[in-house]
Amino acid sequence: MTELAEVKEKIKKLLRVTTASGFSMHEAATAAAAARRLMAEHGLSEDELVMTVASTARMTRRHDDVRDTLAFKVGQLTNTKAVKIMSWPECRFDYFGREPAPMVAAYLRDMCEAGIDSLLRQYRQTTEYKRKRTPKAKRRASLAFVEGCVANLITRLDREMGAGVDQAAIAAADAFMRKQLDNDLQPAGEPRRSTDDRSLARGYQAAASFDLKPGVGGAEAPRLIGKA
């Protein structure tokens, strides 16, 4: 836990010291004053106390990738701000926003990534893929297949979650993110696009079978996303 996160937790504990919780007027007033002092010292607003960040467990490539499009879309649909954190040799995505949306976003992105990887492994076992004669042709087919998967998943996620997008919440998440990151943010580049339409169609069709319910249709996920 970072120093700022520890401060936020301390403030939250102080704010829970109220007469309604069984504390005396003196104890509640003292705790409230201490909370205000800590908030002023660290430049925190009440809104920022519910802001957090969650990182993806599955890493991504440094160069611009069509999968990044999915990661950023997940950020929008969960009312968070997605940032690609550059490191070597691989990178991760961080999601910033109101609790618990960043955790939902990181989980959903990782779940989709795992699904794409599984579908890609299956595709590479097909006769169609094995007939590709050169490594270059196989790389092109793999890229196209993944692009098709991403297109399908984005379409389905947008259909399931698009109505819940809150631009004000996203703007607040963006402001929180910029306050946390010291370095200047680089704009996202344009991912490479495929030229293999047949493989792209195979990817789109394959992703239609991927179950999104654990991420967006379970008993818990919609409730959490709705709180963002």
Image: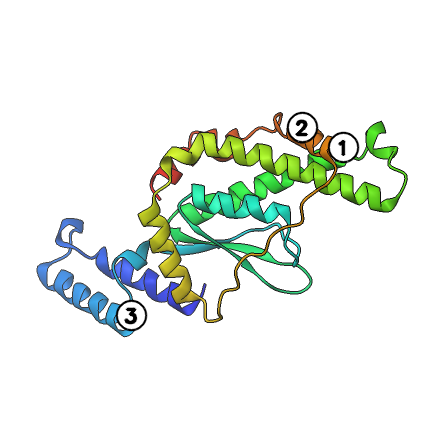
- Which structural element holds mark 3? loop
Which residue sits furthest bottom?
Answer: 41
Quarter of the image where the C terminus is located: top left
| Quarter of the image where one finds residue 223 | top left
Please indicate whether residue 133 sits to the left or right of residue 172 in the image. Answer: right
Q: CA distance from mark 3 to mark 2?
A: 49 Å
- Which structural element holds mark 1? helix
Count of marks placed on residues: 3
Quarter of the image where the N terminus is located: bottom left
Please indicate whether residue 224 sits to the left or right of residue 22 in the image. Answer: right
Q: Which mark is residue 123?
A: 1
Label 2 crowd (10 A; few <14 / some 14-19 / many >=20): many
**Res 43 visible:** yes
The residue indicated by pointer 3 is 43
Which residue sits furthest left?
Answer: 25
Sequence-first tag of 3 and 1: 3
| Amino acid type, residue under disc 1 in the picture | Tyr
Q: Is residue 21 above or below residue 31?
A: above
The residue indicated by pointer 2 is 206
Q: Residue at x 31, y 58 (%)?
A: 49
Sequence-first tag of 1 and 2: 1
Sequence-first tag of 3 and 2: 3
Q: Residue at x 28, y 56 (%)?
A: 47
Q: Residue at x 49, y 65 (%)?
A: 185
Label 3 crowd (10 A; few <14 / some 14-19 / many >=20): few
85 and 143: which is toward the camera: 143
Q: CA distance from mark 1 to mark 2?
A: 9 Å
